[in-house]
Image: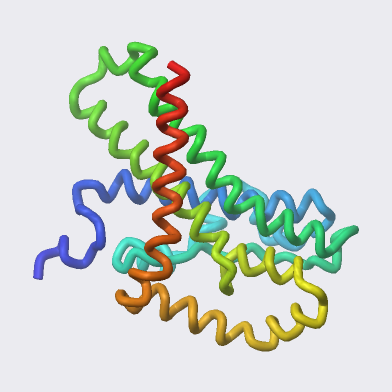
Amino acid sequence: MEFQDFFRFPLEDLPFIVLALILSFTIHEFAHAYSAYKFGDDTAYKEGRVTLNPVAHLDLLGFILILIAGFGWAKPVPVRASRFRKPRTMSIVVSAVGPLSNLLLGIVAIFIYVLLPVTGWLDQASFGVVSAIDKFMTYLISYNFLLFVFNLIPLPPLDGYRIVAELMPLRIRYKMEQNVQWGMLIFLLFVFIPPLRRYTLDPILGLGSSLANEIFAFAMRLL
């Protein structure tokens, strides 16, 4: 078995993948922590999570797994909704800003990617530099649109589940919380069983690629 076989991605692309994932995860978790702090919950702030330092947000095991298995996680941001002035409304916002931060980062990355050749800066760069920038921007765009769509899936422990739970009447929400372990089991089955993933997660995640392509085409038309 070769060293390459341990990784889900091309080994030569690993530095660009790692950098893109670190940036994407950091922005996502920072958005959760910062919004919760602004709404009156200082739990994440006291734990040093209101920061853009990746060390505060990355989970080593979760990060290694995403490189090996294509699925992983960052450290969840601790949130006490009871400290919010409007707990349910503000909880929805705190949950939503994580995926939305990835969408925004993906859109910004697309426009940077499209505008770079226009500036003429790349004309002075070597082939190696241009290739490196191209790979990094491609992964950065792809992962952020994927994270945007993925995290809105309404299954625990994803942000989409928290948003849906907060929108439900209290009686239904209570039943959802009682059965959260079954939701997590369903989620894991969708992730790790290829036939199930092929007809569930894969089509959903494909929406991220479609959205990225539409925005890329729009950005190109603006030139």
Location of residue 171 in the rendering, given as x and y in whole percent from the top left corner: 81, 82
The number of numbered discs placed on residues in the rendered structure image is 0
Location of residue 174 in the rendering, given as x and y in whole percent from the top left corner: 76, 83
Image quarter where the C terminus lies is top left
Judge by depth and name the residue closer to the eye, 222 or 42.
Answer: 222
**Image-based side of 158 in relation to 192, left or right:** right
Compared with residue 50, is residue 180 higher up or lower down, i.e. above or below? below
Location of residue 107 in the rendering, given as x and y in whole percent from the top left corner: 50, 36
Q: Residue at x 73, y 50 (%)?
A: 35
Residue 33 placement: quadrant:
bottom right
Residue farthest along the left direction in this orientation: 1
**Image-based side of 82 in relation to 30, left or right:** right
Image quarter where the N terminus lies is bottom left
Q: Residue at x 49, y 81 (%)?
A: 186
Residue 200 placement: quadrant:
bottom left
Compared with residue 68, is residue 30 higher up or lower down, i.e. above or below? above
Residue 117 placement: quadrant:
top left
